[in-house]
Amino acid sequence: MLPFVMLPRPLQESNVVGKGGSAGFLGKGFDPYTLYPEGDDLDMAKMERIKIDDLQLPPDVFALRLERRAKLRDLVNQQMSAIDKAVADHKLGEHYERALNLVVSGRAREAFSLSTESAELRDKYGRNTFGQSLLLARRLIEAGTRVVEVIWPKIANSDHHSWDQHVDLENRMRTKSAPMFDTGLSALIEDMDQRGLLEDYLVVAIGEFGRSPQRGVSTSGNDNDANGRDHWPYCYTGLVAGAGTKRGYVHGKSDKTASAPAEDPVHPTELLASIYHAFGIEPETIVMNHLNQPRELVKASAVTGLFA
């Protein structure tokens, strides 16, 4: 099954596309499979048009024929020891085998088939890009995918249901961003809990920063109207569920204006360390980067108070 998947659009700010989500120095072999349905950010039915052509056989190629092609490739490779030695570090044979299994088994294609879910459950998640992306994420997890990243379905610094609410904050929060987020995320957590998936899987919902405590004040050089809030990285909220974390628990506390943490602050690196901790991985484990240099996964300690 696909190990890592990112959907339904790349992370984008202005015209800069793909600001995160790749495997970085770990190499492209660990990059996610990307699923970006056609349609703009206001097209809330785009998840109905998912295309996974690269995960299915062409009409004129049946499974046995594809397997014969793989055997032929292996036969040719046996005569190319010098090339094999040159690309050994890239583990191409392993990647070929995974790709072949994905296409032949059909398991991935079935996971992407949202139409097999009941209309009632699809409605519960929300008939919009975010809700249906979360439902697809749950299906992928059940099928064996280990990590799914769901990007908020709007260019980061834009209008409508974007969270970058320099203007029209109340209307956008009440009618666009918040209802879509609350409906989808609550449905995902409840659905995963009922299926027993929260025993082993961790759900993390977080953004890059919060919003300024005062309306109409510029904190980053942006223009804000009287009903808008600017960027504020000094205090904001994240949500985690599953994988041994406490239920119904609030960690930390802000001051009365949400300007700064007042109790038990958590740095982003500590949240990342806590994610590794939930996976059973020591946060400061040393790995080798693409230049063969030693590097810690993250220089921080897990917030063990999050866990039961």
Image (tube, grey):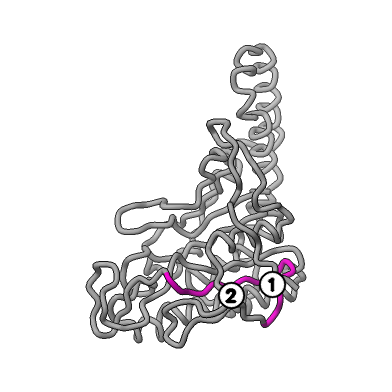
Which quadrant of the figure has residue 116? bottom right
In the rendered structure, find residue 264 and report the number of the disc placed on it: 2
- Please determine whether, in this image, residue 200 is positioned above or below residue 51: below
For disc 1, the marked residue is 305
Residue placed at 50% from the left, 77% from the top? 261
Which image quadrant: the C terminus? bottom right
Nearer the observer, 219 or 114: 219
Determine contact: label 1, label 2, CB under 8 Å.
Answer: yes
Residue placed at 26% from the left, 74% from the top? 218
- Please determine whether, in this image, residue 245 is positioned above or below residue 140: below
- Please determine whether, in this image, residue 247 is positioned above or below residue 113: below
In the drawing, does residue 204 fall left or right of residue 213? right
> What is the secondary structure assignment of the residue under circle 1?
helix
Among the two numbered marks 1 and 2 on one chain, the one whose residue lies closer to the N terminus: 2
Which quadrant of the figure has residue 168? bottom left
Nearer the observer, 283 or 158: 283
- Please determine whether, in this image, residue 77 is positioned above or below residue 242: above
Q: Position of residue 214 (x, y in %)?
A: 33, 83
Q: Position of residue 181 (x, y in %)?
A: 50, 76
Front: mark 1 or 2: 2
From which residue to which does the magenta span run? 234-248
> What is the secondary structure assignment of the residue under circle 2?
loop
Hey, what amino acid is under mark 2? Asp
Residue placed at 63% from the left, 40% from the top? 287
Q: Position of residue 40 (x, y in %)?
A: 36, 62
Hey, what amino acid is under mark 1? Gly
